[in-house]
Amino acid sequence: MLLDEIKKENDIKNIPLEQLPQLAGEIRTFLLEHLSKTGGHLASNLGAVELTMALHYVLCLPEDKIIWDVGHQSYTHKILTGRKEGFEHLRMLGGMSGFPKRSESPCDSFDTGHSSTSISAGMGYVCARDLNKENYQVVSVIGDGALTGGMAYEALNNASQLKSNFIIVLNDNEMSISKNVGGISSYLGNLRTAEGYNDLKIEVKKGLNRIPGIGPATVKKIHKAKDSMKRLLIPGMFFEDMGITYLGPINGHDCARMIQVFQEARKIQGPVLVHVKTEKGRGYEPAMRHPARFHGTAAFDLEHGIPLNKNGKANYTDIFSTVMRKFGDREEKVVAVTAAMPDGTGLKRFRNMFPDRFFDVGIAEEHAVTFAAGLALGGLIPVVAVYSSFLQRAIDQIIEDVCLQKLHVIFAVDRAGLVGSDGETHQGCFDLTYLSMIPNMTVMAPKNKWELSDMLKFAVKYQGPIAIRYPRGEAYDGLEEFRAPIVLGRSEFLFEGEKTALLPVGSMVKTGEKVYRQLKEDGENPTLINARFVKPLDEKMLDFLAAGHSLIVTMEENVKTGGFGMAVADYMRMNHPQVQVLIFAVPDQFVEHGNPEKLKEKLGLDPVSIYEKIKEAR
């Protein structure tokens, strides 16, 4: 097998050009065999195989730099830099990351995980290279979905001023996670029809330069007239009008052709964008038919593409989806907003039933929030569904455009807490902190699937900014008998006792219940409370607890700094200093990838660890 000859970076250069298609097939087979067992980002990686191979064939790593936007298409890059063995434990605790990691290999130039950052980082490398008088290539690879993010245009605008070489590869598969939307998608669709122009330009330039004496001079004259010619042949000329040389579109599954174009791109003084057309999921029929479903997949049956170990139980996203679908019928002013993730956030059903009230703004969380503010001012009730980690990108807009104006915008914060396999860039461990710090914001977290439904109903009737954060995965169906009406800023007493009070938030109520049962077995009679509201803090409940309890134990899937536990501790220190507060939260660190339950054990957030710490504190 050719793949056996790839043991380290640059080994691909030893493989003859005509054998590269065979290597591409072997890489796809390798990815399918391994990801069907471990799960991972499949469709994006299958689509970027030849593109990655061509870059590695032209560049010399780690001296040259490749910056992958988001990074979920970097598996072939990892294979070609000698990390095949790491796929046995891909995205597992202690195993290889699913994203580029500088700590993993010197061939990983930039740690990524969020979208639309690669051009900015690449430009930073270029400027550092030039100031240091060094001589290496810098290539930023960005998808057409990521090109809907505003940061990409800020970087393109800035990059147009460069006088030295900087290659931007636009990996165009017409997808982000879900189908792309908006003007840039339509623009690229038009460019895809203009392939002949750039082929003609390259071949004519080569031919003329071969003519002694008059060839180069003729090229210069033609170069002066090129803009007029291009405007006749290519619609828009968006990139060239910004001062960025445009090459493409190129067949992203033709290695030889891409190698030729990348070699040409290296010679250009200034920024150059190479438009490469690829097919997401290429080589695996189920992923080609359902690229969104195979964007990030769990282990699956390779023959049929069916997920393994699916228990059929609803997860929190499913519950949100069902409730939103019902609101579509009952509340005509409810509208839904998402940032390129109708499937991931559970809004697909709402979109299908109420297309006029559904808005996918692309990978543009900042715009999504301010757009929602405008919807609210227009008399609608916008529900912004977004992952916790991605909502971080819009903190300024939440502060300035929603909370400052006290607008009724509902934030459905999915994937809150420890999400697992995607690691540091995707753990939703900061939202309680960054949302709670903002004046006028109300923050809730449900204990189980029924409470998520109740909180959404409460949020729709509420007036003002409000966020509901809920975890990834199976929705807890315990404590069904406890369903007290939701009252602003009021907790829910589940079991009333004495001395020790357990005060978990949202997903940690399940853990708190287990700790409660264990303490009961020891003959103790603790109190168990479902916090419900992180902000406003239930001060009356804390005053009540202070009268009959000497220890309050808070539990949250959020960083300790600025979180719920610290708010409780500050209040008790100021008003009831005799009461001890024991905080269980994510420590001041970025949490690596791995199974969420194993991560909780490592962080001391599992029932056994909490129980033992409580016993020590008594």
Image (cartoon, helix red, strand yellow):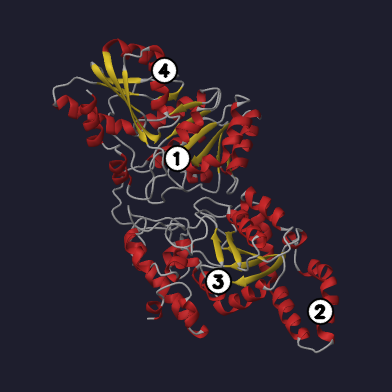
Q: Nearer the viewer, mark 1 or mark 2?
A: 2
Q: Nearer the viewer, mark 3 or mark 4?
A: 4
What residue did someone put label 4 on? Answer: 571
Question: Would residue 488 appear left or right of 69 to someone viewing this image?
Answer: left
In the rendered image of this protein, does residue 454 appear above or below residue 384?
above
Mark 3 to mark 4 CA distance (whole Å): 57 Å
Mark 3 to mark 2 CA distance (whole Å): 28 Å
Among the two numbered marks 3 and 4 on one chain, the one whose residue lies closer to the N terminus? 3
Mark 1 to mark 3 CA distance (whole Å): 36 Å
Q: Position of residue 488 (x, y in %)?
A: 45, 19
The numbered mark at residue 97 is none
Q: Secondary structure at mark 3?
A: helix
Count residues near mark 3 (Cα–Cα under 10 Å), then give few for <14, some for 14-19, many for 20+. many
**Residue drawn at 34 percent across, 50 percent down:** 594
- Front one among 529 and 168: 168
Q: Secondary structure at mark 1?
A: strand
- Front one among 569 and 470: 569
In the rendered image of this protein, does residue 139 appear above or below residue 614?
below
Count residues near mark 2 (Cα–Cα under 10 Å), then give few for <14, some for 14-19, many for 20+. some
What residue did someone put label 1 on? Answer: 414
Q: Nearer the viewer, mark 1 or mark 4?
A: 4
What residue did someone put label 3 on? Answer: 55
Q: Position of residue 145 (x, y in %)?
A: 58, 55
The amino acid type found where label 2 is placed reads Val
Mark 1 to mark 2 CA distance (whole Å): 56 Å
**Residue drawn at 75 percent across, 85 percent down:** 207
Image marks 4 and 2: residues in contact by CB distance under 8 Å? no
Count residues near mark 4 (Cα–Cα under 10 Å), then give few for <14, some for 14-19, many for 20+. some
Among the two numbered marks 1 and 2 on one chain, the one whose residue lies closer to the N terminus? 2
Mark 4 to mark 2 CA distance (whole Å): 75 Å
What residue did someone put label 2 on? Answer: 219
